[in-house]
Amino acid sequence: MKQSIGIGLMGMGVVGGGVVDVLFDKEERLAKLIGAPLSLKRVLVRDVNKPRAVGLCDGMLTANADDILDNPDVDIVIEVMGGEQPALDYIMKSISLGKHVVTANKEVMAKHGAEILTHAREQGVQVLFEASVAGGTPIIAPLLRDLVTNDVISINGIINGTTNYILTKMAQEGQDFGVALSAAQELGYAESDPTNDVEGIDAAYKLAILSTLAFRARVSDADVYSEGITHLTAQDFRYASELGYAIKLLAIASKTDGAVHARVHPAMVRSDVMLAKVDGVLNAIEVQTDLAGRVLFHGRGAGDLPTTSAVLADVVNIARDVVGGAPPPPPPSLSDDVSISPISALETKYYMRLNVAERPGVFAQILKVLGDLDISIASAIQKETDDAARRAEIVLMTHRAKEASVQSALQAIGRLEVVNEIGSLIRVEEWD
Amino acid sequence: MKQSIGIGLMGMGVVGGGVVDVLFDKEERLAKLIGAPLSLKRVLVRDVNKPRAVGLCDGMLTANADDILDNPDVDIVIEVMGGEQPALDYIMKSISLGKHVVTANKEVMAKHGAEILTHAREQGVQVLFEASVAGGTPIIAPLLRDLVTNDVISINGIINGTTNYILTKMAQEGQDFGVALSAAQELGYAESDPTNDVEGIDAAYKLAILSTLAFRARVSDADVYSEGITHLTAQDFRYASELGYAIKLLAIASKTDGAVHARVHPAMVRSDVMLAKVDGVLNAIEVQTDLAGRVLFHGRGAGDLPTTSAVLADVVNIARDVVGGAPPPPPPSLSDDVSISPISALETKYYMRLNVAERPGVFAQILKVLGDLDISIASAIQKETDDAARRAEIVLMTHRAKEASVQSALQAIGRLEVVNEIGSLIRVEEWD
């Protein structure tokens, strides 16, 4: 039996700092759980001289990855650097050198997860990544272990806390996007460059990972349609509320007839469903399965301690296997027989907000465009008429329609002389 | 490597039938997941001649448990018979004979879990019991595996679908308990003898299991205070709603200063919290932890397919370890240093509904009793005054008070000449 399990930590930002804190605070408890102590060998940082809050022994910090990769005392590499490179290189090298890997890196796992897991299987090591989706809220292990006998029908989730915080503020306080974003940045819930979050890219990474595991198919972030929240306005939230809906940035995936579709975009959901009530920085993922029905996981999606909870749980579980001499469980096998369904194949209901000239016949013109494309209307309301400027806002809710038809309709509507501006197009998600 | 993994199934009621169905429907998929086929060897039933919907091969059914226990081809015993005996005997014998066990038996695990897991550890076999709490909704494995690095602060849950269905009907349709119970029985959501469910006994079994795992302490069902829902009336739901609360049968456990307290009872919760929105037969369990914060698991708590999902996930996970030659992971070690805190030590807020004579000074008398016991009132409302009969109903909401004081107060209030009847006492649960 091993004397101790050696850890190489790559990255000491917010999450890395949390990992170091808990590794020391819970040293005895972790050793008891594993049956051997964890021993932090080296910590990789960019700048070894930068002053740090966390007190580590002299010589622990290094700017040279080989001090971890080529270190025979390192059994498990924890990668919490983030970003695609050099994290991907370090992960692949760790595996090649027979080291297990625990990562929180959603970008790397979304883009390269299949090859990483294949390489790990060949090398006989484990790669775990619970922290890459929904922070401290379990979802990956439940998908792979607890729900393993199910066929997954769909996944619906709120998996980016930054955008959910912003949307909550827009809904509850009537703020416009820019104001809500600034508020989020001030509280540290959004970065100074918030693109990855507000454009849905972060959520697309996470959905690619979940879809791959749920549907046993290679789904990369490039396969996920993503549309962010920057075009939403306070008016959209007001109208949604009047109509009985909330607006959330949803990550949605399902598999039908051998094709997976995966998308991230703002969506109207009925105000009384569970997902509509997930507020602030929290995440929630609902997995719909054939045996267990709908199962919801809800909790904190980010932050140093929640992410550390997931990272160190993965470390404990690998370490227990190492101590017990258990061979690594095989990673999920992925089918090559599954195609990706494009967004144009979607059929759903839509909300449209149009700014039009206030003249007789405007409605009729718009409805003709829609009717010609087989799009029928559930409701149409004229709002906010500005008599002086002779302008009005029209809010339409369609019945189920084809995405391709709706996009064509929008283009045609935009070309109408009576239409000043296409305000919003928001897809409506409804479930039984 | 083994040719196949032999299964002995004990019990073929609703859950057992579901297990057989899925074992055959998903035969190939399960074999692929495990790396070897599962082979059903024998099924234990009470009456082999009873006509059954599930078609099994001749000779499969037996009324003799030894056909499974003494069968060298049985590697894993699935116990879905329910009840304390003979299930406990069969589980212990299976372990003694070197067989792994998967059970859904909350009563056995609540009363004897510690000794079962100790025996399993000594014999080097696995005993898994995900299905014993919250049906197909993962909770046990997340507690033991995904949240393993956390200290659990508290557990709050709705873990009995029968009572939650009844309470939902009482809340949404203004029904009295008896009417709602009959409706539940007609739909098969409640048994003809509903005692275990409506008296909170079933929930107490499950809370004992969760508390044991969460706090690493021996908590049996006898340590759980339980109070059922039979005394709730439609009026309580109306007043709760007016005051901004929902009424749920909550299972609550926490650990403070080395003492665990665990209780199941009706509770008022604010209408805007997650648990207030869990309706019908669904379950939800919120685990509050030091690192991951509050994590909620929500889904179907019972039924043949959800329970089968959990049972067969446990089977797959044991089978994979057997095929891979992995030694069984050690069960959680339990501390002997933890005491059980009695209900009398509780401090919380309370709702009281009293039926009183409509006379001057009644309020004053009641408030004096409460004041003498250091119980202060947040609000007091007179409702439903019946001038003709000179009777009224008083609804009181206290500030935080000691359980022991409140029980003494109720006794003293009941003895007042002006008080006709103590209508209800419901504890109020509020969280930050």
Image: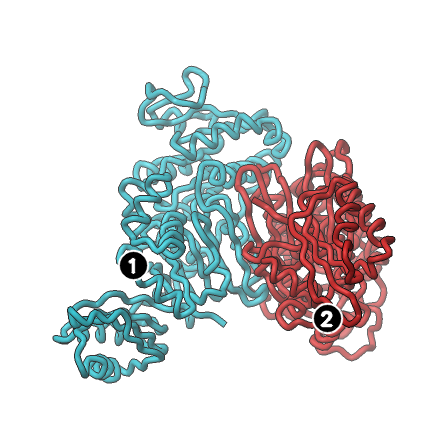
Chain colours: A cyan, B red
Which residue type does callout 2 highlight?
Asp
Say yes or no: labels 2 and 1 on the same chain.
no
Q: Residues within 10 Å of mark 1 (few under 14, many from 20)?
A: many
Q: Is residue B14 above or below residue B397?
A: below
Residue at which label 2 appears = B176
Along the line of sight, which residue is nearer the eye, A72 or B156? B156
Query: Where does residue A51 sit, x and y in percent of width and height?
Result: 36, 20
Could you say whether the residue bearing mark 2 is in a helix, strand or loop? loop
**Would you say residue B189 is visible in this rendering?**
yes
Query: Where does residue A425 sit, x and y in percent of width and height?
Result: 28, 67
Could you say whether the residue bearing mark 1 is in a helix, strand or loop? loop
- At a point 54% along the width and 52% down the height, the residue shown is A142
Image quadrant containing the C terminus of chain B: top right
Query: Where does residue A26 sit, x and y in percent of width and height?
Result: 57, 29
- At a point 45% along the width and 46% down the height, the residue shown is A301
**Would you say residue A114 is visible in this rendering?**
no
Q: Chain of mark 1?
A: A
Q: Is residue B200 left or right of residue B36?
A: right
Q: Is residue B120 left or right of residue A305?
A: right
Q: Is residue A14 above or below residue B119?
A: above
Q: Residue furthest left?
A: A417
Residue at which label 1 appears = A232
